[in-house]
Amino acid sequence: MQHKQTRKAAPGRVTSSTRAARSSSGTASPTASGALTCDQIDELLSDLLADELPYAARVGVELHLASCENCAASYKAMKRTVRFVQAHSNTPLEAGTPGGQYLDFTRAIMDDEYEKEPIDAIAEAVVGRRGRG
């Protein structure tokens, strides 16, 4: 069974209550066959990961994940990202630390008035690591 997956950037996290409201309005209801679409599954993945789905919804999502490689890969990537963020949540964002290098790099990308280009921030981090080795 092949599933078409299209991704849309969501303006905010969709919660169980907003999903319930959508479902009652008909905009997030299952397809005629009763199966959820990839877009609907995508909206439910974070709630599945947080164990916040009602039993029937969880079963529906898990069935879809078992038969859809794209959605299963998205869920696996989300779990990996959450594990990474949790494992590094106490990383200091101070100069000279990996966290500081990350902060420097992201600032170079986001802040047009920052004195460094992103490539320069990366180069400093790499050269700095070699110099300490």
Image (spheres, rainbow, N blue to C red):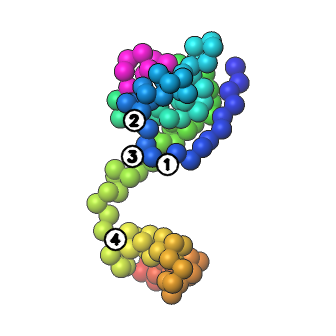
Around disc 2, counting alpha carbons within 10 Å, would you say few (fewer than 14), some (14 to 19), or many (20 or more)?
A: some
Q: Label 4 to label 2, Cα distance in Å?
A: 31 Å
On the question of residue 122 being in view, the answer is no
Quadrant (top left/top right/bottom left/bottom right) for the N terminus: top right
Q: Label 3 to label 1, Cα distance in Å?
A: 23 Å
Question: Is 40 situated left or right of 85 in this image?
Answer: right
Quarter of the rendering containing residue 93: bottom left
The tally of labels here is 4
Judged from the image, the secondary structure of the residue bearing numbered disc 1 is loop
* Amino acid type assigned to the residue bearing label 2 in the image: Thr
Question: Is 51 situated left or right of 69 in this image?
Answer: left
* Amino acid type assigned to the residue bearing label 4 in the image: Leu
Judged from the image, the secondary structure of the residue bearing numbered disc 2 is loop
Magenta-colored stretch includes residue 58: yes
| Chain-order first, disc 3 or disc 1 | 1
On the question of residue 25 being in view, the answer is yes
Numbered disc in front, either 3 or 1: 1
| Chain-order first, disc 4 or disc 2 | 2
Q: Which residue is mark 4?
A: 93
For image coordinates 53% across by 19% down, the residue present is 63
Q: Nearer the viewer, residue 52 or 121?
A: 52
Q: Main secondary structure of the magenta part?
A: helix
Q: Residue furthest front?
A: 25
Q: Which residue is mark 3?
A: 83
* Amino acid type assigned to the residue bearing label 3 in the image: Arg
| Chain-order first, disc 4 or disc 3 | 3
Q: Which residue is mark 2?
A: 15
For image coordinates 60% across by 26% down, the residue present is 37
Quarter of the rendering containing residue 3: top right
- What's the mark number on residue 11? 1
